[in-house]
Amino acid sequence: MSENKPESGPTVNPRVTWEGCSVLLDINDGDRLVFARLSAGSTLKIGNKTFSLQPLIGCPFGSLFQVESGKEKPYLSRFIPPTEENNVQDEGGCQLQEESRDNRAIIDNNQAQSLTGDDIDAMRRQGATGNEIVEALIANSATFDKKTQFSQEKYRLKKQKKYAPRVLLRRPFSRSICEAYFKKYPARIGFLRVDTLSLLLSMANVTANSDVLVLDMVGGLVTGVVAERLGGSGSVCNTYLGGTPYPMEIIRMFNFNNEICKRVLRCSVNDLCAVQNETSEQVSQREDVCTMESQSDEKTSLSVSTEEVHLSSKNGFLDLVPENELSTTGKTCKAPKAGEKAPKEAIQSWKENGFSSLIIAAPEQDAWILVKDLLPLLTYSAPFAIYHQYLQPLAKCMRNLQLEKMAIGLQLSEPWLREYQVLPSRTHPCMQMSGSGGYILSGTRAYSNTSQS
């Protein structure tokens, strides 16, 4: 399967946005995150104002935009942050003043600001920009000069987010997509943290020209990450139990081209496994259970009827965006579709040669029942990695693998990640962090007399 290279579609610059591509909009430095598909008619609502996303088309990922007041309506304009040369030159002179300054004498009685709301509205009618309003608020504050430098930065940032919101254009890839979902809706990706996801790929030895078997019940995140790692070489077989494939809407955010999408195939476990050793009653019972679980997953999955998935925040957390906040009018540019049904030639090749690695991310399933059916599909000495939110199912699976002598080098791992805030004179671990990122059972398939061919 990995030897036949499919024809590639039209080439685009992956560093620059194009019409129809998916983007991750980071509003006000992580206060709000929005997944959107760019088109001429796409709009984004920030506060009570609606902005067109057309200025974002053709811009490099990482560009920063700021809300500007136009003659007819506000719009998003490219913003280049000023250099910090002047701040570095004045740092030595202000250091002594900073040491003798504190916030103990400042009383928050809402009387320090002399600029009223009517004055701000009048400035807006006169065409004042958001930055000019922020500078006017600072100039009319009676306590701004008495604050410490850290407090001044917080005050300026707070006013900038309100009167001059900024939008960072980010590229959706493995880390950004996983972090966005894990921040507010971790259950939709099985509580799979980004460090656990990277360790899962490493332990499964996902490399170029690999044929990877994936059982993905976390919305297609693992399938998309594996396809991104392969980069158009090898193949990804997204398998499923029963007759209904699991939803994999997240994979559409990766902006895969036709070449990579053709490498992502779907095939049921019944078509891959030799089912002659199973009774018809066992097969029917397993299909009924999997059909009920797949229907439950479809109810909780993200809506993709408008060809885009949206996330936003409320009080600093991600939330589903209402349809009136992010809409698309006119013709929608659809992304290439991944996950076509595997042809018979590919299935026969996988049966004869075996898969080079196996990844299972099915938090709602029994790990041992899945491994017992899927592990014989691997070639001998092929690695596998199983993710689960809890330890006990993997410990049971590990014990059964040892008794059946189906694998060697078994290892249970618990990734641990701690994020640090790195700022001048205030670098420290973040106050809030996730307690656990789940567990991974990894090993290598071994040959034994009792193993199935």
Image: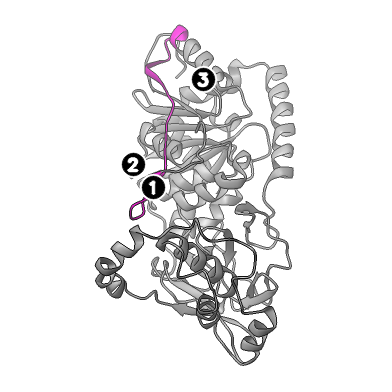
Q: Quadrant of residue 15?
A: bottom left
Q: Is residue 262 visible?
A: no
Q: Are marks 1 and 2 in contact (CB under 8 Å)?
A: yes
Hey, what amino acid is under mark 2? Thr
Quarter of the figure with the C terminus: top left
User: Which residue sits at x=46%, y=64%?
Assistant: 147
Query: For residue 406: magenta?
Result: yes
- Mark nearer the N terminus (2 vs 3): 2
Which quadrant would the N terminus be assigned to in this image?
Answer: top left
Q: Which mark is residue 394?
A: 3
Give the x, y percent position of residue 210: 37, 40
Q: Which mark is residue 207?
A: 2
Specify few, some or many for label 1: CA neighbours under 10 Å numbering under 14, 14-19, or 20 or more.
some
* Residue under pointer 1: 229
Relative depth, front residue between 53 and 306:
53
Q: Is residue 135 magenta?
A: no
3D distance between C-alphas at marks 2 and 3: 25 Å
The amino acid beneath tag 1 is Arg
Q: Earlier in the sequence, mark 3 or mark 1?
A: 1
Could you say which disc has been placed on residue 97 in the image?
none
Badge 1 or badge 2: first in the primary sequence: 2
- The picture quadrant where one finds residue 164 is bottom right
Q: Nearer the viewer, residue 200 or 204?
A: 200
> Residue 72 falls in which quadrant of the image?
bottom right
Going by the numbered disc 3, the residue's amino acid type is Leu
What element does badge 2 sit on?
A: loop
Q: Position of residue 96 (x, y in %)?
A: 29, 62
What residue range appears in magenta? 402-428
Left or right: residue 267 compared with residue 226: right
